[in-house]
Image (tube, helix red, strand yellow):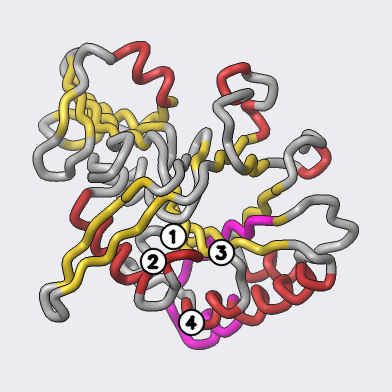
Amino acid sequence: MKKLLFFAAIVIVGAVLFAKKPEIKTKIPLIETNDKKQDKTTVASIERKSIFIPEWTIGEERISDNGYDRWIYFGADENRPDNISWTTYKINSVEELNKLTLQDITVEGIVLDLEISGLATKNLINEISAGVERIYNQAKEQNLKLSLALYGDLFYRQRPYDLKTLNQFSDEIMVMAYDFSKSYGEPGANFPNLEFKIMIDNYLEFIPPEKLTIIFGMYGYDWTLKDGKPLKPAGALTLNQIKTKFSERIMTDSESKEKKISYLQSLKILFLTRTKRQ
């Protein structure tokens, strides 16, 4: 049997790291893209370093240091530690978005994790935009910053979002540059190099670079294969688990530019995302 794993490690174009989603450092060029038509190059720099702290990792020593500029909590509000001044609301449907109300929020800012799927109809797009505008106005009334986390494959899969409007009603746009290859689908990179560059160019058509943050996940998917096809959905491994178990087998995949590990259990293959973009 073959196995294949892709995993993300860290980084962001504007600013962020997840303990299951990225990181940043000051004034380090992150990605360079060439526009052949206009003969110009766009350079994005990392301006700060942030990390998402999932509820299930609270208390682990490995996320208690490293000098991040911003910690962002991901989980139930009642379990958020007092020393984390940002929190996340995951929204899976328009109904959830419409029910959300910001009241007595004691944080500096919130991340609206918009994971609403569906056909990109005018009605759905307008409903999402209206919901975000309402939350943004509530945030401003309470002097809160509002960041929106959006799909990295928003353009590729024609997701139902109006970026021009969402840019107007947000302080920051975070792009989830992982899960391009789904755990329940064919094995592949978390976010291949070519698609990553196209994604950045697409977002920069609507979002100014200083407002854009790219999120990478610090985890990977491990597929069990037979004759090149997955036998079941991939399992997830953390970056630390991958480094501990496979540190001597890591190689770079020439096409996706992500890290790859091949091994036998019967035969296993792992793919991991690079720790930095070239």
- According to the picture, the residue beneath numbered tag 4 turns out to be 164
Boundaries of the magenta span: 110-128
Dot 1: what SS? strand
| Quadrant including the N terminus | top left
**At 56% across and 64% down in the image, what residue appears?**
172
Dot 4: what SS? helix
**At 70% across and 62% down in the image, what residue appears?**
145
Q: Earlier in the sequence, mark 1 or mark 4?
A: 1
Residue 239 against residue 49 in the figure, above or below: above
- According to the picture, the residue beneath numbered tag 2 turns out to be 154
Q: Earlier in the sequence, mark 3 or mark 4?
A: 4
**At 18% across and 14% down in the image, what residue appears?**
264
Q: Is residue 121 magenta?
A: yes
Q: Is residue 116 magenta?
A: yes
- Disc 1 to disc 3, C-alpha distance: 14 Å
Residues tagged 1 and 3 counted as in contact (Cβ below 8 A)? no
Relative placement, left or right, of 58 versus 263 is: right
- According to the picture, the residue beneath numbered tag 1 turns out to be 151
Q: Amino acid at mark 3?
A: Glu
The numbered mark at residue 172 is 3
Q: Earlier in the sequence, mark 2 or mark 3?
A: 2
Residues tagged 2 and 1 counted as in contact (Cβ below 8 A)? yes
**Could you say where residue 77 lies in the image, as x and y percent from the top left?**
78, 44
The answer to whether residue 74 is seen in the rendering is no
Residues tagged 2 and 4 counted as in contact (Cβ below 8 A)? no
Residue 118 against residue 193 in the figure, above or below: below
Q: Amino acid at mark 1?
A: Tyr
Nearest to viewer (mark 3 / mark 4): 3
**At 63% across and 19% down in the image, what residue appears?**
60
- Examine the image and state in which quarter residue 203 appears: bottom left
- Examine the image and state in which quarter residue 79 appears: top right
For label 2, the crowd category at 10 Å Cα-Cα, with few meaning under 14, some 14 to 19 and many 20 or more, is some
